[in-house]
Image (cartoon, rainbow, N blue to C red):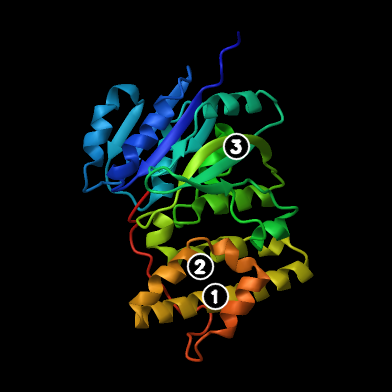
Amino acid sequence: MPTPPRITVILPCLDQGYYLERAVCSVLDQGYDNLELLVMDGGSADHSVEIIRTYEDQLEHWQSTWDSGPAEAVNTALTWATGDLVGVLDADDAYLPHALDEVARAFADDGVDWLVGQAVRIDETDEQLGELSADPPRSLASFLMSETGPLPGGATFYRTDLVKAMGGFDSTLRLAYAHEMHTRLYAADQKPTVTGARLAAVRDHDQSLAATHALAAGPEFIEAAERYATHLAPTHRYLLWRRHDEMRRLYAAAHEETAADPGQRGLWQQLLQRPWWLARNDYRRQLLQNLPSTAPAPGNNNLDTGRRHAA
């Protein structure tokens, strides 16, 4: 039998000790013969390092040091990666059984450079909440306007050479760095190959990066999309800017309401940690009808994202 491709899994983490062991074990328990696991801890103050040390004999490399965010951690790991293929798994997510075998099988086709699989959503206790389907957009314009939502990051794999040729991930983004890479790939006429196989479980919980920085996530997604607006025809560019203007107003309203009434935070958080929902006309119409008249002007909410709080 031919040697399976070497797969590098990069696992960035920060203070996710409650979930970290499950993530690490979901990689190691794959039983994949040609695996490289790199754990990049951002200087956790919880018991994450203790967990990592428990498995260090099975890791190719690990470190615990300050970084500016998960994108910087992933880019640092890419300089050491020796795999033909690479995937990034958040410390609170997990691979599903046989995921890496499915990945290797899909990449056996020479035409596959970027693979996206299916995922499931789980809660804090691993109970399944529903499907998180890979739904590639019809066009770059559709992707920039978030009509299908971001691709499930934990279920996404790349040829390592492709990611390096693209210059790695944008470390100025803490929340939308994977989405920006996918946008950049689409703009470069790269299309993902979609497999029907379930590859990952993506966890919803109150301390996830998307949840703790929900108000900052949407503006980052907007910023990432607008970088590539010049690739669109004038009509689509106008539609993108109009939609983003509405979305900025929604985020500004959320910022004002949650500052005035902390009780509103939970409701807005549930919506804003999934910013692509705001692309739907029914959501936007309903929310915009209830905007406070004193909501800050679009683009003037200047939210400080701070340092990342979770992987």
Check disc 2 and report the residue beneath it: 219
- Could you tell me if the residues under marks 3 and 1 are in contact, i.e. CB atoms within 8 Å? no
Residue 56: x and y in percent read 28, 26
Check disc 3 and report the residue beneath it: 162
Please identify the residue farthest to the bottom as the structure is shown.
293
- Who comes first in sequence, dot 1 or dot 2? 2
Residue 191: x and y in percent read 70, 43
Give the answer, above or below, for where 95 lies relative to 273.
above
Question: Residue 303: which quarter of the image?
Answer: bottom left
Find the distance from the CA under tag 3 to the CA under tag 2: 27 Å
Q: Is any part of residue 168 visible from this angle?
A: no
Q: Is 44 placed left or right of 305 in the picture? A: left
Check disc 1 and report the residue beneath it: 248
Residue situated in front as seen by the camera: 167 or 147: 147
- Could you tell me if the residues under marks 1 and 2 are in contact, i.e. CB atoms within 8 Å? yes
Looking at the rendered structure, the secondary structure element under dot 2 is helix
Find the distance from the CA under tag 3 to the CA under tag 1: 33 Å
Q: Nearer the viewer, mark 3 or mark 1?
A: 1
Amino acid tagged 1: Arg
Amino acid tagged 3: Leu
- Could you tell me if the residues under marks 3 and 2 are in contact, i.e. CB atoms within 8 Å? no
- Who comes first in sequence, dot 3 or dot 1? 3
